Amino acid sequence: MTIKNLLKNISCGALLCTAVMAMPALTPQAEARPEFIMFANSTDLRFFNLFQGSDPQTHQKGPNQTWVEALPVDGFVLSQPMSDCYNGSCGSDVVLNFATVYGSANNNNGWLKPFVDNNFTKRGHSYFQVNLKDMGDPIVSDWTAILNNFTTIALAAKAAGLEGIFFDDELVNDNQFFRYPGNLLQLAPGRIAPTDTKRGNAAYYQDLAKYQAAFRNRGRDVMNRLQLAYPGIKVIFAHGPTASEPRMPRVISYGMSEVMTGYFFTGMLNAVRPGAKMVDGGEFYGPRSVADFAYEFNWRQAGMLGKGAFGFPVFNSSLISKSSALTWSTKVGFGNGIFDEPTCPAAQVSCITPADKSIPMTPAIMQDTLVNALRASNSTVWYYSDESGTPGRNYAVPTGAGVTQPWIDAMRNALNLVP
């Protein structure tokens, strides 16, 4: 598809889109250590308190922006209303408009333009969060609008000077997009649809291998669109391809061949052109020690290729092709996720009550954990804080009103220990 034809299909004026595509992307400063970013953890731009005064469209610099920019992080994962593609649907019934996602000279209601208007200094290491959910069946659904939406997202991220996109692909609650059969609707020949087409027995559906191939193809399509709009884009998956590998050691997490995340990821990876980057974000949360992080890093980088590296088993991988295996460690970046709450051992089935969460977390533990995570990453370490888990732990507002200083000191100390 040519750029000219592409511009006819997305909700963006041709002149504006052409100008954005021609813009040089911001190049983040080279870091001696992996970049360290934080989830903004808010539903809109009020995270930075940019909308002040009686007119919310003035985009005045808010009193918290200085505080936020002084936090010891390189950038942020920006959660905006469109992260859920309007109430959770990223499907063909939604059309994302560039003027809404980014903004324009005549529209100050865009979600990203205030970061540019206020010269937010950490844009170059920031990412636009997109929750991958309810995007339709990869075999029978029409993905035209979905792919156009990804183009719009990439254009907006580039225009705002962001480094890329952060995909939240977690299988929680109503988000079963990447689970087979889950939301997948293609019936096997001669089968009658069950009453619940989203939660039916897998026997009613096409072969698992057909869906694995279909998700791989859709991943390729998405990456091609992202790069067409934003060459050099960086894409982070919270849960990387390991989620689809059933041989993943249970002490790290769980993997199932019925989870399509890995096939979508590898499809995107196969389409990566020079300059773009794919990152396995490493959302495990349980590792603490040097040995913990080394073990899961070695598994993701080499063990899951099935070659017997580092004492992991030898097997034939249906997820990673032989040609992909040859360049796996150089084409994929490996990051780590940090959660500032107690959590559960990966092998534990229940992780609901405080009693289940036997792996503790304090500022001192977090400092050591962050040091170890940074040393076991070749790309990005990201930090997640759930305000609902600890009321008042809001890093977006100054100490006293939000997070306590020991947590910020722990982050700063960790970064000082990793040159």
Image: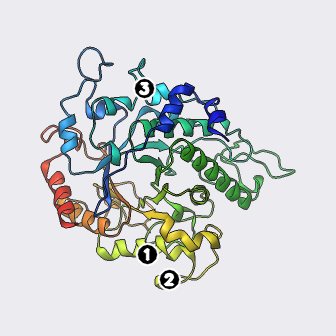
Residue kind at label 2, given as amino acid type? Ala
Left/right placement of residue 240 relative to residue 2 reads left
> Could you tell me if the residues under marks 2 and 1 are in contact, i.e. CB atoms within 8 Å?
yes
- Residue placed under numbered mark 1 in the picture: 298
Let me know if residue 177 appears in the view.
Answer: no
Figure quadrant of residue 198: top right
Q: CA distance from mark 2 to mark 3?
A: 49 Å
Compared to residue 45, the image places residue 209 above or below, namely below
Location of the C terminus by quadrant is: bottom left
- Residue placed under numbered mark 3 in the picture: 103
- Residue placed under numbered mark 2 in the picture: 309
Question: Which x, y percent locates residue 193?
Answer: 78, 44
Q: Earlier in the sequence, mark 2 or mark 1?
A: 1
**Is label 1 in a helix, a strand or a loop?**
helix
Compared to residue 155, the image places residue 306 above or below, namely below
Q: CA distance from mark 1 to mark 3?
A: 43 Å
Residue kind at label 1, given as amino acid type? Asn
Location of the N terminus by quadrant is: top right
